[in-house]
Amino acid sequence: MEGECRVLSIQSHVVRGYVGNRVAMFPLQVLGFEVDAVNSVQFSNHAGYAHWKGQVLTSQELHALYEGLKANNVNKYDYVLTGYTRDKSFLTMVVDIVKELKQQNSKLMYVCDPVMGDKRNGEGSMYVPQDLLPVYREKVVPMADIITPNQFEAELLSGRKIHSQEEAFAVMDVLHRMGPDTVVITSSDLPSPKGSDYLMALGSQRMRKPDGSTVTQRIRMEMRKLDAVFVGTGDLFAAMLLAWTHKHPDNLKVACEKTVSAMQHVLQRTIRCAKAEAGEGQKPSPAQLELRMVQSRKDIEDPEIVVQATVL
């Protein structure tokens, strides 16, 4: 990567484990980015454990941190990356910061993982306060260049349900019209052409031609399901997609193949290690299922492509 590329990452942080900034910083640094991290929360561990303790950053504290950067004239960024947020005023403050950063750098890219909820056993539910949804719809998504919702989050943002691949792309078109040029639905419960053992992700990238017209590239990816519950995969996906779209700005197919393939290497290594630690016939604990990030450095830096994307 030529020159210094700097990312402002505003996400959660844990002392033990890999979610939020803890999982995003390592692959970004391995792939050549400088990362300034603001921890929206600082917890002992993620909520997949029986217990956790910690602190939550307020919008006023976020403002103070940003003002400190500005006072030293070091609030210069190429990318902003955001993930899990629970507070409406905090999310609104993030929008104000991104707006100011974009005003001073028109080329700044904002990558947003709109973490709001997920589907469990076919039923979707939000795990953040409902008053965040209108902020995402009206302020965050219009400001974003790349968004990485899961199927349920894409449905929330668009106000439409998804029952087929065609409906998914119609929802992605709605999201494109709201602002982002790149939309990746990171996971869905849609049936995969490869069968029930596979999970399907869909991507759509809108590109502008010199004459002002636009062309849209659509892709589909199918990943084999793994018999384990991992935490932090969405944060990891968003960070690596940021890196690989930077390196392949007009090729969503290659960017997604490298992102998803690297993730598959990390997850396969994690589950192998977790099962070995747990012992034969025993279910791995949340601690044993923490992502093996450091051990996967070479796979993150130069992933062997094990998942191909289909251009539609």
Image: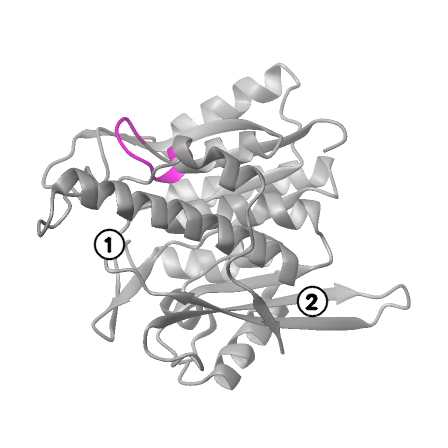
Q: Nearer the viewer, residue 250 or 153?
A: 250
The kind of secondary structure element at disc 1 is loop
Q: Earlier in the sequence, mark 2 or mark 1?
A: 2
Q: Nearer the viewer, residue 296 or 79?
A: 296
Kindly check if marks 2 and 1 are in contact, taking CB atoms under 8 A apart as contact.
no
The kind of secondary structure element at disc 2 is strand
Look at label 1 and name its amino acid.
Answer: Val
In the drawing, what numbered circle is on residue 117? none
Question: How many residues crowd around disc 2 within 10 Å: few (fewer than 14), some, or many (20 or more)?
Answer: some
On the question of residue 181 being in view, the answer is no
Membership of 288 in magenta stretch: no
Would residue 75 be found to the left or right of residue 19 on screen?
Answer: right
Magenta region: which residues? 14-22
Q: Nearer the viewer, residue 66 or 252?
A: 252
Would residue 113 be found to the left or right of residue 16 on screen?
Answer: right
Is the residue 132 above or below the residue 70 in the image? below
Q: Nearer the viewer, residue 89 or 183?
A: 183
Query: Mark 2, mark 1: which one is toward the viewer?
Result: 1
Is the residue 157 above or below the residue 284 in the image? below
Residue 153 coordinates in the image, percent (x, y): 39, 65
Look at label 2 and name its amino acid.
Answer: Arg
Mark 2, residue position: 206
Residue 57 coordinates in the image, percent (x, y): 34, 30
Mark 1, residue position: 229
Q: Quadrant of the C terminus?
A: bottom right
Where, by quadrant of the figure, is residue 208 drawn?
A: bottom right
